Image (cartoon, coloured by chain):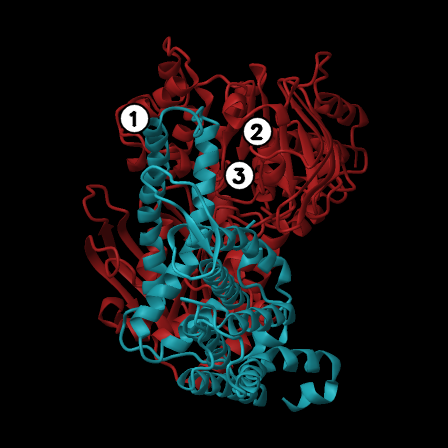
Chain colours: A red, B cyan
């Protein structure tokens, strides 16, 4: 008997003409691990909300068709009973934690369903112990790291002992190691507790193979529904990008079998890699070299030390030099000091010790407003930039503040960012991807020589990421130094030329991306892990395709000789 | 930056108390600060609070509070004799000033001002102690027994406060790097610039509130009557601290009824001890209040005591 069954579901959010979900028919069996993927605005989150009974219950709007839970119409189930059966964890932990303390947060849902004290105490203790949160029970939720917050959000839902757990992009704000840990935990819940898992994700390299079934969505409709291997093959055949890089690679190279994990991929590669072409590798490595620049560096950081007023040393002896035209990614665990470094480069924070020079100017001698002519800074939340009535006014606001003439530059920039049609639209009415581009435009319009971006790929799908990556490349090629802080190793590998790894306030690695990411255990992209020990020159999809072609030729040649 | 001024789990004895015991201790200190006018009582309360802050490992935070409070106390002490000309013992009489008249500084007015300054330090210290030893969730869970909705609303607001402060700082930084200089311009211009910060914060908060509400809805908030999660156990240490606080309050009321805790400043300063019971009463008041700090010291140094309470 299916746990969930959706029949002919069509749903419109209030005051919208386009359906968020269109004629959805799907069933989810008890104990199944279902992965839902697709682009931004494809209806993934709406489907998750429908399964959790939140639409139309919470959001309102128009609905057609029915969602059944255990053969009962989900809208007819008492909300309290439904909360005991179906739990949902959202993307942003900040926006789902409601209490001050950790233990109170876990107990919040239990209080809402009116459980007796003894039962609550047992459940809170159990779930905190299971998720390793016991040592944090007296902490304030505001002081937890991103990974801990997401784990707490999960704990507060698990405490209600649901039979089905729905997760809406739960790892989007976690560093690779924390994301891996979180997903392994989810798999454990599925396997050991027989919990039905419905995972909505866009970062697929770590979760595609965990699922029993994968659903691909587009424009509110289900495009494909099947086992991971079959879905990957179908997507590659139809030119869809929602597959792990390793699967896309083998499919593109024409292999009949599509592997889903690095392990499977390496097994397929074995035997074909004996005579890897050293000349080709050298060529790739030559291409990988960071472009040298004889001029004075755009950014020069010397022995930078910084501690926050609470005494926590966020930066410890940082030395960094960035040239104009360089596109550099800063990676590292949560709270490693990445954002603190970025704020120093923007002049928002001043060094306790050491020196930060931006275009030759000591940041200690300049106010952030003075730095604004040289440095553009896009923080993690694009909403921090948007408050004018129209997109055009947002750009004019920056120009007016800096006393710069427009001379058509706002129009050209909007055109370049694909925002020309939104010129007179209120930025708050735009999608998250568009909002981010407006925020970027409001910074770029001043023509900064240095562009700093904090987690710019958060919440973006493959297509939007590719557009952003290409744009950043163009900006860098125009002579701007671009530094981005990200958890997205695939993006860093694909679009940047240099990578800095930070841990515990220190730089643990700095160099060409192949040298840094290729040697990393947890921060290597999936493609790099596939070729580890076989060909250290392979990091990006393009490089891998070239290598695969070479292997195919070898395979063909060997077959002919034998 | 402001974290040290608020509750941080340090595992100290005073933080381990049941909220009823710690809140009673704080409430008694506050009541005594208000009802006593005797300088020795006020100074004694300050010393007891200092002791409790020391036991709570909160002297660094207290120092921060005192940096502001001391200036205010000095101001109170200085201003009182300027505006209060009561008292028979004239210290100094100034020249005739236009509009202001002839300032008269009396020893009684200076003493009264100093006592009020100490009272101010008492209150700030007690507030500091409250912040350091009472976890906000415990505080609200105590009140949720009889004011559930208000306690929950206050708890939610408490969580939002630091989140909104951080959001405000992020918005300010983003605006600064778009060329907004918050320190420049006329008062009106600066007000407009700051208003834009609140504008962004408000719009974003409204958008975020929908997601918070959705998460609460998904966890059955508002689906019917709630139960109350109580995780705090009442231990012998709580009984002892509660008893000490109540004993101190009882003696305080007795002292006031006998006129021991009050002090006459005007027209002339009265004697510090006009009754033979004055000193024992003061010792009893402070003794009861010192119990939590003494027990904390005892637990740190005597495993047997710790295991028994």
Residue on which the image places disc 2: A346
| Crowding near the residue tagged with mark 3, few <14, some 14–19, many ≥20 C-alpha atoms within 10 Å | some
C-alpha gap between disc 2 and disc 1: 29 Å
User: A554 or B24: nearer the eye?
Assistant: B24
Is residue A249 visible to us here? no
Q: Are marks 3 and 2 in contact (CB under 8 Å)?
A: no
C-alpha gap between disc 3 and disc 2: 15 Å
Residue on which the image places disc 1: A422
> In front: mark 3 or mark 2?
2
C-alpha gap between disc 3 and disc 1: 24 Å
> In front: mark 2 or mark 1?
2
Q: Quadrant of residue A210?
A: bottom right
Q: Secondary structure at mark 2?
A: loop
Q: Secondary structure at mark 3?
A: loop
Residue B131: x and y in percent read 51, 64
| Chain of the residue on which disc 1 is drawn | A
Residue at screen point 37% across, 50% down: A44
Residue on which the image places disc 3: A455
Q: Quadrant of residue B227?
A: bottom left
Residue A40: x and y in percent read 39, 41
Residue at screen point 66% across, 30% down: A543
Residue A17: x and y in percent read 19, 41
Q: Secondary structure at mark 1?
A: helix
Can you say which quadrant of the picture contains the C terminus of chain B?
bottom right
Which mark is first along the chain, 2 or 3? 2
């Amino acid at each position: 008997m299916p746990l969930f069954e959706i029949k002919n579901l069509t749903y419109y959010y209030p005051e919208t003409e386009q359906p968020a979900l269109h004629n959805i028919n799907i069933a989810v069996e008890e104990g199944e691990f279902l992965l839902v993927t697709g682009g931004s605005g494809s209806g993934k989150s709406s489907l998750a909300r429908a399964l959790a009974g939140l639409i139309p219950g919470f959001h309102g709007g128009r609905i057609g068709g029915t969602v059944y839970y255990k053969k009962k119409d989900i809208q007819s189930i008492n909300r309290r009973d439904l909360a005991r059966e179906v739990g949902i964890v959202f993307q942003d932990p900040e926006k789902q934690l409601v209490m001050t303390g950790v233990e109170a947060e876990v107990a919040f849902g239990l209080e809402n369903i009116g459980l007796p004290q003894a039962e609550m105490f047992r459940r809170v203790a159990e779930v905190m112990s299971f998720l390793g949160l016991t040592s944090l029970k007296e902490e304030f939720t505001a002081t937890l790291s991103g990974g801990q917050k997401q784990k707490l959000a999960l704990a507060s839902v698990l405490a209600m002992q649901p039979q089905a757990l729905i997760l809406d992009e739960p790892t989007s704000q976690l560093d690779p190691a924390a994301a891996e840990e979180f997903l392994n935990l989810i798999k454990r819940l599925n396997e050991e507790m027989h919990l039905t898992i419905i995972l909505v994700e866009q970062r697929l390299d770590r979760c595609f193979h965990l699922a029993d079934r994968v659903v691909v969505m587009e424009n509110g409709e289900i495009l494909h529904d099947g086992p991971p291997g079959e879905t990957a093959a179908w997507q590659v055949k139809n030119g869809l990008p929602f597959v792990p890089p390793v699967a896309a690679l083998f499919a593109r190279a024409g292999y009949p079998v599509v592997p889903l994990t690095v392990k499977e991929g390496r097994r397929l590669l074995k035997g074909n890699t004996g005579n890897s072409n050293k000349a080709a590798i050298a060529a790739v490595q030559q291409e990988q070299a960071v472009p040298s620049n004889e001029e004075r560096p755009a950014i020069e950081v010397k022995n930078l030390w910084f501690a926050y007023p609470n005494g926590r040393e966020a930066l410890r002896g940082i030395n960094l030099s960035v040239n104009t035209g360089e596109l550099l990614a800063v990676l590292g665990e949560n709270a490693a000091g990445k954002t603190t470094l970025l704020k120093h480069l923007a002049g928002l924070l001043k060094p306790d010790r050491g020196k930060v020079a931006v275009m030759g100017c000591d940041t200690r001698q300049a106010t952030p407003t003075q730095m604004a002519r040289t440095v553009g800074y896009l923080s993690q939340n694009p909403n921090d930039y948007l408050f004018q009535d129209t997109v055009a006014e947002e750009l004019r606001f920056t120009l007016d503040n800096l006393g710069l003439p427009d001379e058509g530059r706002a129009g050209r920039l909007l055109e370049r960012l694909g925002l020309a049609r939104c010129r007179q639209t209120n930025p708050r009415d735009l999608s998250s991807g568009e909002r981010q581009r407006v925020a970027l435009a409001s910074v770029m319009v001043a023509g900064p020589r240095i562009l700093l971006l904090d987690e710019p790929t958060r919440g973006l799908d493959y297509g939007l990421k590719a557009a952003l990556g290409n744009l950043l490349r163009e900006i860098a090629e125009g002579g701007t130094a671009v530094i981005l802080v990200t958890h997205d190793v695939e993006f860093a590998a694909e679009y940047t030329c240099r990578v800095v790894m930070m841990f515990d306030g220190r730089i643990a690695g700095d160099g060409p991306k192949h040298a840094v990411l290729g040697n990393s255990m947890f921060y290597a992209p999936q493609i790099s892990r596939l070729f580890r020990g076989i060909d250290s020159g392979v990091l990006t999809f393009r490089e891998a395709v070239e290598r695969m072609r070479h292997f195919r030729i070898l395979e063909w040649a060997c077959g002919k000789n034998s | 930056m402001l974290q040290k001024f608020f509750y941080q789990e340090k595992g100290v004895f005073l933080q381990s108390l049941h909220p009823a015991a710690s809140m009673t201790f704080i409430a008694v200190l506050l009541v005594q600060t208000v009802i006593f006018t005797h300088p020795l009582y006020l100074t004694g309360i300050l010393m007891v609070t200092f002791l409790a802050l020391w036991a709570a490992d909160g002297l660094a935070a207290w120092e921060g509070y005192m940096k502001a409070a001391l200036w205010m106390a000095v101001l109170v002490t200085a201003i009182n004799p300027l505006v209060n000309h009561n008292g028979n013992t004239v210290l100094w009489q100034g020249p005739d000033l236009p509009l202001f008249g002839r300032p008269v500084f009396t020893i009684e007015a200076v003493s009264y001002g100093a006592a009020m300054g100490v009272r101010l330090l008492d209150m700030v210290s007690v507030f500091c102690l409250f912040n350091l030893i009472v976890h906000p969730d415990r505080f609200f869970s105590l009140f949720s027994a009889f004011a559930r909705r208000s306690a929950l609303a206050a708890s939610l607001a408490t969580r939002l406060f630091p989140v909104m402060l951080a959001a405000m700082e992020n918005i300010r930084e983003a605006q600064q790097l778009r060329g907004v200089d918050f320190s420049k311009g006329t008062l009106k211009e600066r007000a407009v610039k700051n208003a834009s910060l609140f504008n962004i914060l408000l719009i974003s908060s409204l958008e975020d509130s929908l997601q918070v509400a959705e998460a609460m809805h998904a966890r059955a908030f508002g689906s019917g009557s709630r139960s109350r999660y109580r995780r705090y156990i009442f231990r012998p240490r709580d009984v002892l601290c509660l008893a000490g606080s109540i004993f101190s309050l009882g003696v305080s009321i007795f002292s006031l009824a006998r006129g021991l805790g009050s002090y006459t400043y005007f027209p002339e300063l009265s004697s510090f001890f006009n009754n033979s019971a004055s000193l024992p009463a003061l010792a009893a008041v402070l003794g009861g209040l010192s119990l939590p700090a003494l027990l904390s010291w005892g637990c740190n140094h005597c495993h047997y005591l710790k295991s028994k309470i």
